[in-house]
Amino acid sequence: MKNYSELQSVSNFTNRTINGSVCTRDNYVSQVVFPLLYTVLFFVGIVMNGLAMRIFFQIPSKSNFIIFLKNSVISDLLMIMTFPFKILSDSELAHWSLRAFVCRVTSVIFYSTMYISISFLGLITIDRYQKTVNPFKTSGPGDLLCAKILSAAIWIIIFILSLPNMILTNKKTTVFKVKKCAFLKSEFGLVWHEIVNFICQFIFWINLAIIVVCYILITRELYNSYKKTKSVRKGPRKSVNMKVFIVIAVFFTCFVPFHFARIPYTISQTRDFFFACSSERVLFYLKESTLLLSSSNACLDPFIYFFLCKSFKNSLMNMFSHKKKMTHSTEETVRRKEVLSAESSEETPL
């Protein structure tokens, strides 16, 4: 028989009433709509990032930019691999115990890779600014070593911050407690979860400031260059400007909405007695909707690789060109065999 505190927690979650109304959510949205959207993101993302990974394995790490892009694609792939667990858990197609695994492991990996991606977008932006100011500067061995050390430091720091969230989600699993990940955390686990969320917010705002400042400087450099050359090569220059701004477009589309919604949602999870049921419901759907946008970053990053990395673009075009030639050659071989077979049958006596 369940103890009193457990029953009380379950009651607070499932039957909590505010002004006489039961605190419930729209099961169709949370169990059908969002899982379907994540399924689409999973298949699109796994194809695009699998292809990106294959191409990057063929490109040497000859610049800081490529090193940052390679780390970004690894982070995106790890994020995408967590989608099936979220889909099965949210849609309730799997056993309820999977929800505990999602709370303890895959959700932690998901958020960790999100902030790794945010950090690398900041580094990519700094690199693009340096490339705009000094377009002919190349990365030396020392620069490449620093880029690799910095990349490793980002992975290690985020992992150290995230690991306690796995360890401290250690309460006994029941069919009721898995309905809310906060029920599985120890008291210190709730505190640490809140601390890490504020640290992650700090990481986001620092990178947001870096990206905004760098793009203001990039815009100034491009404008000054345009003023010097006036209308000379005006068309190509506009195309380049659009390519440069793809990073800030992806960042603002994917990450800014979520981070405006995350702080109040996190507080509602760890201190739910401060919030009315209707407020918790609104914050939940707002968080899930903006989280979906953040997840779409894994599908949008390959566009950054294509438009900003010449090595990636050339390798991709060569791959498709080679496949096209191979397909054409195969079709030609089959056609010749059919012609020879037809000629042979015509010559065969009755």
Image (spheres, rainbow, N blue to C red):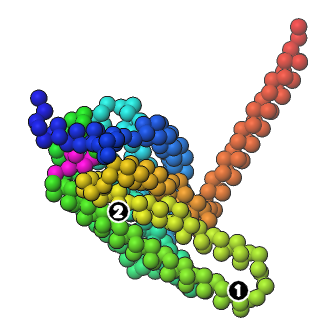
Image coords of residue 208 (percent x, y): 45, 73
Specify which label sits upstream in the sequence, 2 or 1. Answer: 1
**Residue 118 can be seen in this image:** yes
Of helix, strand and loop, which one carries label 1?
helix
Q: Is residue 176 left or right of residue 33?
A: left
Horizontal side, residue 153 vs residue 59: left or right: left
The disc labelled 2 sits on which kind of residue? Ile
Residue interval drawn in magenta: 181-186
- Dominant secondary structure of the residues highlighted in magenta in the image: helix
Q: Quadrant of the C terminus?
A: top right
How far is disc 2 from disc 1 in space, using C-alphas?
42 Å
- Residue position marked by numbered label 2 in the rendering: 263
Q: Where is mark 1, residue-wise?
A: 226
The answer to whether residue 129 is above or below residue 28 is below
Pick the residue in front: 277 or 240: 277
Residue furthest to the front = 19
User: Was residue 305 drawn as part of the magenta stretch in this picture?
Assistant: no
Of 172 and 73, the residue lying toward us: 172
The structure residue drawn at horizontal position 32% and vertical position 46%, both measured from the top left corner, is: 19
| Residue at figure coordinates x 74%, y 89% from the top left | 229
